[in-house]
Image: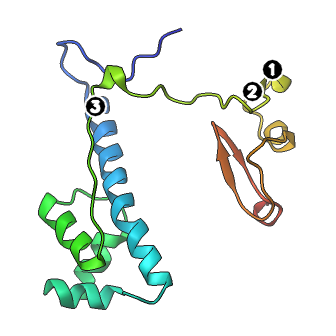
Amino acid sequence: MSTQIVNTGVEPFSENELAYYRRRMQNRIYDCIILPFSERLKKGEINRAAIAQRLHKDPAQITRWLAGPSNLTADTVSDLLLAIGADLSLASFLVENAPRPNYEHPRSKRSEVKSKPFDLDAMRSLETATASAGSAKITGLFYQESENHRG
């Protein structure tokens, strides 16, 4: 069964398609900013006030930019990365050449839960190769919670 990732024909994109891909790009760009920022913050090498000073911005503006994914300009992304001491590597590809979505991890043992494929209790009982004590992991579409995260 073939899954089409995006409308590659000549039909106009739906508003949902446009919104999905815009948000996905915002999330990817945010990750490229927040991951190096978090790493440097943990090491005590940088903070929001230092970024604000370096960029001649109000600290509240830096907080807004780092609060979550948003529609940042290319200049803002560049400025934030420079202030953090990080760089961005970009790559594009044709959607028909994109890796297929991982709907089922090859080691998920999903076949053991045929009647209720997304039953959370059944998913928790599965053992996978990526499960580890004390942390939450995502394996394919199966979210596994650690003992200290269960309600």
From what the image shows, is residue 35 above or below residue 128? below
Q: Which mark is residue 114?
A: 1
Between tags 1 and 3, which lies in front? 3
**In the image: residue 81, left or right of residue 134:** left
Q: Dot 2: what SS?
A: loop
CA separation in Å, label 2 and label 3: 33 Å
Please state which amino acid type lies under the numbered disc 2.
Pro
Residue to which mark 3 is pinned: 93
**In the image: residue 101, left or right of residue 142:** left
CA separation in Å, label 2 and label 1: 6 Å
Q: Decide: marks 2, 1 in contact (CB < 8 A)?
A: yes
From what the image shows, is residue 81 above or below residue 150? below
Please state which amino acid type lies under the numbered disc 3.
Phe
Q: Dot 3: what SS?
A: loop
How crowded is the residue under tag 1: few (<14 C-alpha within 10 Å), some, or many (20+)?
A: few
Residue to which mark 2 is pinned: 117
Q: Residue at x 25, y 31 (%)?
A: 15
How crowded is the residue under tag 3: few (<14 C-alpha within 10 Å), some, or many (20+)?
A: few
Please state which amino acid type lies under the numbered disc 1.
Lys
